[in-house]
Amino acid sequence: MVERRTPDGKTAYLEAGHGRPLILLHGFPMDKAMWTPQVDALSTAARVLVPDLPGFGGSCGFDGRPSMDGMADRVAEFLDALQIREKVIVGGLSMGGYVTLAFARRHPGRLVALILADTRAGADDEAGKTSREKMIALTREAGPRAVIEQMLPNLVGPDVRTERPGVVDEIRDIASAQEPAAVIAALEAMRDRPDSTPHLGAIAVPTLIVVGEQDAITPPSRSEEMARAIPAAELVVLPATGHASNLERPEAFNAAVLAFLYRVA
Ligand code: MLT
C-alpha cells in the first residue's frame, strides 16, 4: 500500500494492486486511514484506490457549498485526475455510502458495480437535521474530538467494544485529527442530502450491501430496504458487528467483498 496525491494536488489517496479499480469512500468523521485493513487485503482482486473526501485527511476542502453531489463529483474528478476511463467499482461506508449513491445517480456510466456498507438511502428527517445542527455547534465550540466522543457509543457494536477496545481508540484517533471545517462541511452536506430512495430502482449494476447486525446508526432494516429496491442487490449481514463493520470485523468484511469482487471485477 502506498500513499499518493493526484497530479492536480487536490486529493490524497492510498493505492494497492492492479486491474479493475475499486474506489472505497470513508465514513464520517474519518479519513482514508479507516480502510487500512482493506487496502492490501482486497488488492488481490482489484486496484484499490482510497481517496480522502473533501477537506478530510490530506485532501483539499470544498470550493463551493458542501453537498453529497459535490463529494460525488470530486470522486469523478479523482478518476479523471488519474486518467481512469474504464468502469469502476465504487464502495462506501455510511457517509461514504451516501456519496456512493450520489455517484450512482450522477455518473452511472462510470460504474461496473457498487458496494454499500452500513448506510441508508433516506434523507435526514427533522430530528436528524436538528441533531446535525447540534453537532455543528459542538464542532465549533469543542472540535472534532468532542464530536467523536459523542458518536462512539453508537459507532462500535457492543461485542467488539468489549472484545477489542483498541478499535474504539483507532476510530477516536482518526476522527480527532480531522479539521473542524471539514467536519462542519460534511455535517451540512449530510443534513441537506436528498432522498436517494426513488433512484434505487434505476441502479443497473450488481450491488453488494454489507451491514453489521448490531449497527445502531444505519440498522440492518435500512439495508434490507435497499436490497429490496435495487434490482441486482445481495445482502450480507455480519454477526456480532456494529456500524464500523470494516474495522470491527475486517476478516468477515473482506471475505464478503472479495467473494463479490471475484464475480464482478
Ligand atoms: C458515518 O458513519 O459516516 C455517519 O455516522 C453517518 C451519519 O451520521 O449519517
Image (cartoon, rainbow, N blue to C red):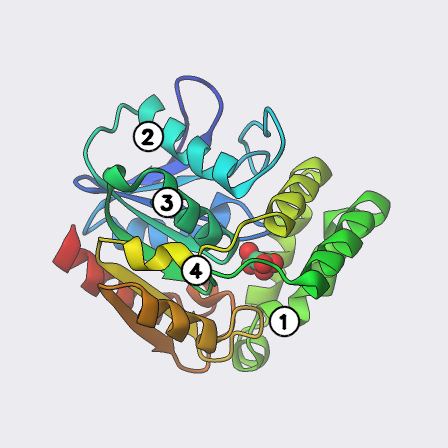
Q: At x 83% / y 49%, what residue is drawn?
A: 142
Indicate if the residue with disc 3 has its beta carbon within 8 Å of ligand 1.
Answer: no
Mark 3: which amino acid?
A: Arg
Distance from label 4 to label 3 (Cα)?
Answer: 11 Å
Distance from label 4 to label 2 (Cα)?
Answer: 26 Å
Mark 4 vs mark 1, foreground winner is 4
The image shows residue 86 at horizontal and vertical percentages of 19, 33
Earlier in the chain: of badge 4 and badge 2, it is: 2
Q: Nearer the viewer, residue 170 or 136?
A: 136
Q: Residue furthest right?
A: 141
What residue does disc 2 label? 79
Residue 170 visible, this orientation? no
For mark 2, does the 10 Å Cα neighbourhood hold few (<14), some (14 to 19), or many (20 or more) residues?
Answer: some
For mark 3, does the 10 Å Cα neighbourhood hold few (<14), some (14 to 19), or many (20 or more) residues?
Answer: some
What residue does disc 4 label? 197
Distance from label 1 to label 3 (Cα)?
Answer: 29 Å
